[in-house]
């Protein structure tokens, strides 16, 4: 095995040992989303990004009109806040219990994914889909 093959093999072994979470973050980082940010800034910006994505998801479902209007407004605020670099020039403080709320968020995502698979008759593994989506998005870079 030559040096290039050894390096490729070592990289494959490392990826095989990564969790899906680590792989997704590696791919998001490859897009450039961590460039110039501390991990704390990256964390709080991801809260805005999650709000934006949740509002986009809500727009794909039939919800009461007043709720749709509020969510559309929230989506715009979340997107503009995420993209406003000047707002993030501080070191955020985060509760040491934030991981519990983040876990609650994932519980709802997994339940929603299961329900969507059931109602569409097309079950899927949301974690695997997320890894594939992150990999496909690398070439787009930061928008």
Image: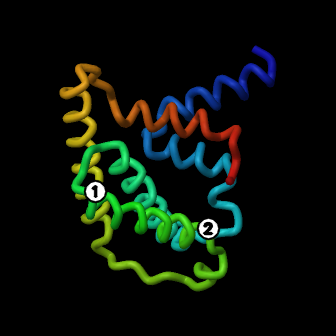
Q: Residue 8: x percent and y percent?
A: 70, 25
Instruction: Describe the element under mark 1 as helix, strand or loop.
Output: helix
* Residue 69 relative to residue 9: left or right: left
Nearer to me, 112 or 57: 57
For the residue carrying disc 2, how many other residues have a C-alpha within 10 Å: few (<14), some (14-19), or many (20+)?
Answer: some
* Marks 1/2: CA–CA distance: 22 Å
Comes first in the chain, label 1 or label 2: 2
Q: Which mark is residue 45?
A: none
Q: Residue at x 69, y 42 (%)?
A: 140
Residue at image coords 28%, 21%? 122
Residue ID for mark 1 = 105
Identify the residue at image location x=56%, y=34%: 14
Question: At numbered mark 2, what does the secondary structure look like: helix, strand or loop?
Answer: helix
- Report which residue position mark 2 lands on: 83
Q: How dense is the environment of label 1, judged by Cα within 10 Å: few (below 14), some, or many (20 and up)?
A: few
Q: Tell me the quarter of the picture where residue 50 sits.
A: bottom left
Q: Looking at the image, which residue is at 35% across and 35% down?
A: 126
Residue 107, given in percent of the width and then of the height, sits at 23, 49
């Amino acid at each position: 095995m030559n040096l290039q093959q050894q390096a490729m093999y070592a990289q494959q072994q490392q990826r095989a040992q990564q969790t899906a979470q680590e792989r997704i973050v590696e791919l998001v980082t490859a897009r450039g989303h961590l460039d110039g940010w501390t991990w704390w800034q990256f964390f709080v910006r991801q809260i805005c990004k999650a709000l934006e994505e949740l509002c986009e998801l809500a727009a794909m479902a039939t919800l009461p009109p007043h709720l749709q209007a509020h969510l559309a407004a929230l989506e715009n605020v979340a997107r503009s806040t995420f993209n406003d670099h000047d707002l993030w020039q501080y070191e955020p403080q985060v509760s040491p219990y934030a991981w519990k709320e983040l876990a609650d968020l994932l519980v709802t995502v997994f339940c929603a994914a299961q329900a969507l698979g059931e109602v569409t008759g097309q079950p899927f593994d949301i974690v695997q889909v997320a890894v594939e989506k992150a990999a496909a998005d690398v070439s787009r870079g930061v928008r």
